[in-house]
Image (cartoon, helix red, strand yellow):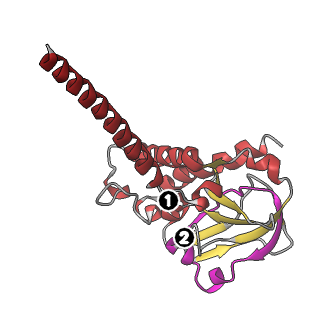
Amino acid sequence: MVIALFVLMVVVLLTAEYFSISRKIEKGVLISSQSNVPVSTDVIERYFHRGHSWALVQPSKEVLIGVDDFAQRFIGKVDAVEMPQPGSLIRQGDRLVTMKHGDKSLSPASPLSGTVLELNPKLKSEPGAINASPLEKGWLMKIAPADLASELRMLLKGVIADRWQEAVRAHLLHWFAPRVGPVMMDGGSLVDNISDVVTEGEWNLLVDEFFKSYESNTNDKH
């Protein structure tokens, strides 16, 4: 009887210890998985317009503006870029700049309204910086926003922006189906010069589908 009670006590103690260790392990794994997930402040703070441009608010409340990766891959190597001059007024949804590649041109929409304060001087001699670093060194201009709080609510950021960009890429591939080869590279990424693999007629249809509609839709709200 004594032996049976002793064995029962040992089993109870071992079981309790097992569950205690299990909870510690699970807690440790949870903490570890959370602490190892990188969070980029830049990704969190960058806002995207559906017309394929972005805005990054500076501590001074001035805003850096550029075009997204989809836009630069869409047009291909940028040979030249036409931009508004400092002091010009731009409006959310209107044409921001005109990027040129050979006989093709593309005009993403402005993410915000405001006054142009400064242009990226690098782009005058190196417009290809837009291709090499569209979200960093290839920024287009700095503006003083006219209605920042209100207009930011119309933009996308974070996970929502990521999901939207994935949907746009999927839409483009569907547009080309069943001949997706010309717009894909190994690994399933978009090519860097879609404008070079389409006819002039196809190019005009693509621009209408992925760019001009955003301008007209936004302007209808004003």
Q: Mark 2 near mark 1, Cβ–Cβ under 8 Å? A: yes
At label 1, the amino acid type is Glu
Q: Which residues are magenta?
A: 104-132
Q: Residue furthest bottom?
A: 125
Badge 1: few (under 14), some or many (20 or more) residues near its Cα, within 10 Å?
few
Left or right relative to 7: residue 143: right
Residue 102 appearing in the image? no
At label 2, the amino acid type is Asp
Q: Which residue is mark 1?
A: 200
Left or right relative to 78: residue 33: left
For mark 2, give the secondary structure.
loop
Residue 50: in magenta span: no
Q: Nearer the viewer, residue 40 or 138?
A: 40
Which numbered disc flags the more N-terminal residue, 2 or 1? 2
Where's residue 188, x and y in %?
33, 54
Q: Which residue is mark 2?
A: 103
Q: Nearer the viewer, residue 98 or 67?
A: 67
Q: Residue at x 54, y 77 (%)?
A: 128
